[in-house]
Image (tube, grey):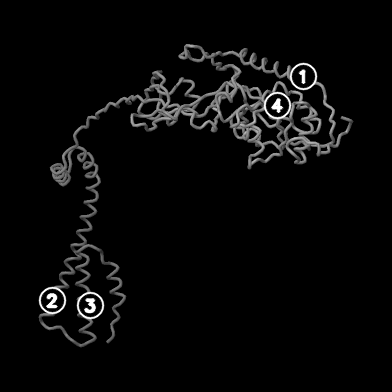
Amino acid sequence: MKIDYRKDIIELMQATGDDLQSLNQSMIALKIISKIYNQAVLGNPPHGEEKRELKAEKNEIATNSKNDEKSVDNVENEHEEKVPAKEKAKETAAKALSPTVLKNKNKYAAVTPLPKPMVKKIIPVAEPEEKQYQIRRKLLGSEAVDENGHSVQYFNEHLTRIEKLENGDTVTLLDHLNDSGNRPIIKVEHHPEPFAPGEEIIEFGPAVIHKDSFGLYIKKDSNGKSLGQVNPEKAILYLDLNTISHFNLHENDLISVVWRASDPSFIRIRWRYAEEEVTIPEKETVNKTKSPVKHKTKGKHKSLLHQLEKKEKQSTEKQSEEYTSRIDFDLDKKRVTVVVGDKSLTSNLAKVIEAHNGVARIIEMKQASNVLRACKESNYVILIQSYIKHSISQILINSPHKSYSIAMATTAGQLAVEKALYRARYKLNVTDNDQIQYPFLVND
């Protein structure tokens, strides 16, 4: 006998719910199906005890089915009753918490105390401290130093002049940095002190910038004092291109230059004056404590330039006559420096050089230490023997590092200088002699 119970088991499993009662009923049904299969297929009839168990299981299934019918009716009735009950529960939930919630609330309230109200304390910000420092003047600008000599704050030349800071002054600074990275100045106490030994700074100016074929240069200050009188290394200062570009310098501008007494050859431009503000130092008097007087006017500046232009005009009037060359040679626009002791007595020599297509420069030289520096950029150097010191001529002639060709004229006459130019042009003897044949254009 063959029994196919697979479809019945599938339907039984699909009808089985996930509640405990439904699972128990399905388990009993599976046991019954298994026993029926054993009896019908394997030929194992149930014993008395097994029969009783089988009967009891059948009764249990019948009882459960009745209970299920009742439970379905009860569920439908309970659902109808729960609808208004839920509405009542919503009303009572707002009035009282459930015992479980109250239990958890009391439990955690004992462990975690309620936070106490915080009182925010406002801590007052301390005002920045003020400290005093001493001013140390530098070639450009100044700096504030502490008691150990360490630099605390640097002030550029513009701020130094606005605050009128001098060496030895005392400044009071805030002990914090502003947006510019500097400590603000609160107070300045002026009591200048002398420089330390070897650190003395010498200022020369304001000096008017002049221009010649070699470029821009300064030679005298506004009081007529020559640079060579205060600086043993420089009688004339030519300005390099970087400096001219940095300060935007032009002819007739007013500048001040500085150097240390221990190193007079290292000269720096400290300040370029505006036309409306020119500092004119007073002439030296017995009372040396008097400070310079500052004139804020354009008139003083224009007056200085007018005086200088008047002197230059007077000197050019003496040179107004053209010179006719008498010796045949060409300087090919090379630079020629004529070294004399008194420039005013040799103003007509520039025409001789220009007549031979050269660039003339006539300098006064009274100190031998400055002569090589003054002539280093020249192609030819002409010495006027009657107007210079012997030591100056010897230095220029015997220098092993000279890059120029040199000749000497015995007098400041134009023909004597023209002959010296010819000898320097073709590197002949320094002095004139009868063996040199000059190619004269006209009879001497």
Label 4 amino acid?
Ser
Instruction: Compare marks 1 and 3 and give the one earlier in the sequence.
Output: 3
Circle 1 packing at 10 Å, graded few (<14), some (14-19), many (20+), is: few
Instruction: Compare marks 1 and 4 and give the one earlier in the sequence.
Output: 1
Residue 367, position as x, y percentages in the image? 60, 28
Which residue is identified by label 3? 33
Which marked residue is nearer to the observer: mark 1 or mark 4?
A: 4
Q: Residue 420 carries which label?
A: none
Instruction: Compare marks 3 and 4 and give the one earlier in the sequence.
Output: 3
Q: Is mark 2 on a helix, strand or loop?
A: helix
Residue 399, position as x, y percentages in the image? 63, 39
Label 3 amino acid?
Ile
Q: What element carries label 3?
A: helix
Label 2 amino acid?
Glu
Q: Quadrant of residue 7?
A: bottom left
Instruction: Give the vertical position of 88 relative to 145 (above or below).
Output: below
Please state, as top left, top right, bottom left or bottom right, where the N terminus lies in the image: bottom left
Instruction: Compare marks 1 and 2 and give the one earlier in the sequence.
Output: 2
Q: Of residues 301 and 115, which is closer to you in this image?
A: 301
Which residue is identified by label 2? 53
Residue 17, position as x, y percentages in the image? 25, 64
Residue 243, position as x, y percentages in the image? 59, 32
Q: Which mark is residue 318?
A: 1
Task: Tell me the distance, in whole angstroms, between the alpha carbons under discs 2 and 4.
Answer: 158 Å
Q: Residue 386 carries which label?
A: 4
With 22 as the anchor, is 251 left or right in this view?
Answer: right
Residue occupying image coordinates x 60% and y 18%: 222
Q: In which quarter of the image is residue 53?
A: bottom left
Which marked residue is nearer to the observer: mark 1 or mark 2?
A: 1
Instruction: Compare marks 3 and 2 and give the one earlier in the sequence.
Output: 3
Task: Tell me the distance, in whole angstroms, between the alpha carbons under discs 1 and 4.
Answer: 21 Å
Q: Is mark 4 on a helix, strand or loop?
A: helix
